């Protein structure tokens, strides 16, 4: 089993939502967003991530416009 490197991941986490209790805990973050029909912020480019819109629709629109 792999050990979660929370402190290391906090330093490189691309999420700008500061009060997030899952920051640096990627497994929890992916599970949380999946359960809410969303995609984690780190999957988005920085300009789209800053909108805090984690919807699948926003994700598709973001990458459709960059294609």
Image: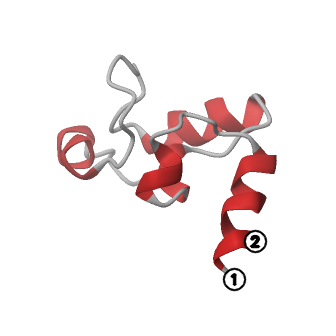
Query: In the figure, is residue 27 to the left or right of 7?
Result: right
Query: In the figure, is residue 55 to the left or right of 13?
Result: right
In the rendered picture of this protein, how many numbered marks are placed on residues?
Answer: 2
For the residues bearing labels 2 and 1, Cβ distance under 8 angstroms? yes
Task: Please state which of residues 3 and 37 is positioned toward the viewer in this rendering.
Answer: 37
Question: Residue 59 falls in which quadrant of the image?
Answer: bottom right
Q: Position of residue 47 (x, y in %)?
A: 45, 53
Distance in Å between CA atoms under marks 2 and 1: 5 Å
Q: Position of residue 39 (x, y in %)?
A: 66, 46
Q: Quadrant of the C terminus?
A: bottom right
User: Tag 2's secondary structure?
Assistant: helix
Which label is found at residue 67?
1
Q: Residue at x 57, y 44 (%)?
A: 40
Query: In the figure, is residue 50 to the left or right of 3?
Result: right
Which label is found at residue 40?
none
**Residue placed under numbered mark 2 in the picture:** 64
Q: Residue at x 76, y 30 (%)?
A: 35
**Structure colour scheme:** secondary structure
The residue at the far front in this view is 65
Task: Please state which of residues 62 and 5 is positioned toward the viewer in this rendering.
Answer: 62
Are there few (<14), some (14-19), or many (20+) residues within 10 Å of tag 1? few
- Compared with 6, 35 (above or below) is above
Q: Position of residue 8 (x, y in %)?
A: 18, 48
Q: Residue at x 35, y 36 (%)?
A: 16
- Compared with 2, 67 (above or below) is below
Q: Residue at x 35, y 16 (%)?
A: 19
- Compared with 28, 42 (above or below) is below
Task: Please state which of residues 9 and 63 is positioned toward the viewer in this rendering.
Answer: 63
Query: In the figure, is residue 53 to the left or right of 27?
Result: right
User: Tag 1's secondary structure?
Assistant: loop
Are there few (<14), some (14-19), or many (20+) residues within 10 Å of tag 2? few
């Amino acid at each position: 089993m792999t050990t979660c490197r929370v402190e290391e991941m906090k330093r490189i986490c691309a999420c700008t939502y500061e009060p997030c209790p899952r920051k640096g805990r990627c497994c929890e973050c992916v599970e949380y967003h999946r359960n809410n029909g969303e995609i984690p912020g780190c999957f988005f480019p920085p300009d789209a991530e800053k909108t805090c819109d984690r919807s699948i629709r926003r994700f598709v629109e973001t990458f459709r416009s960059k294609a």
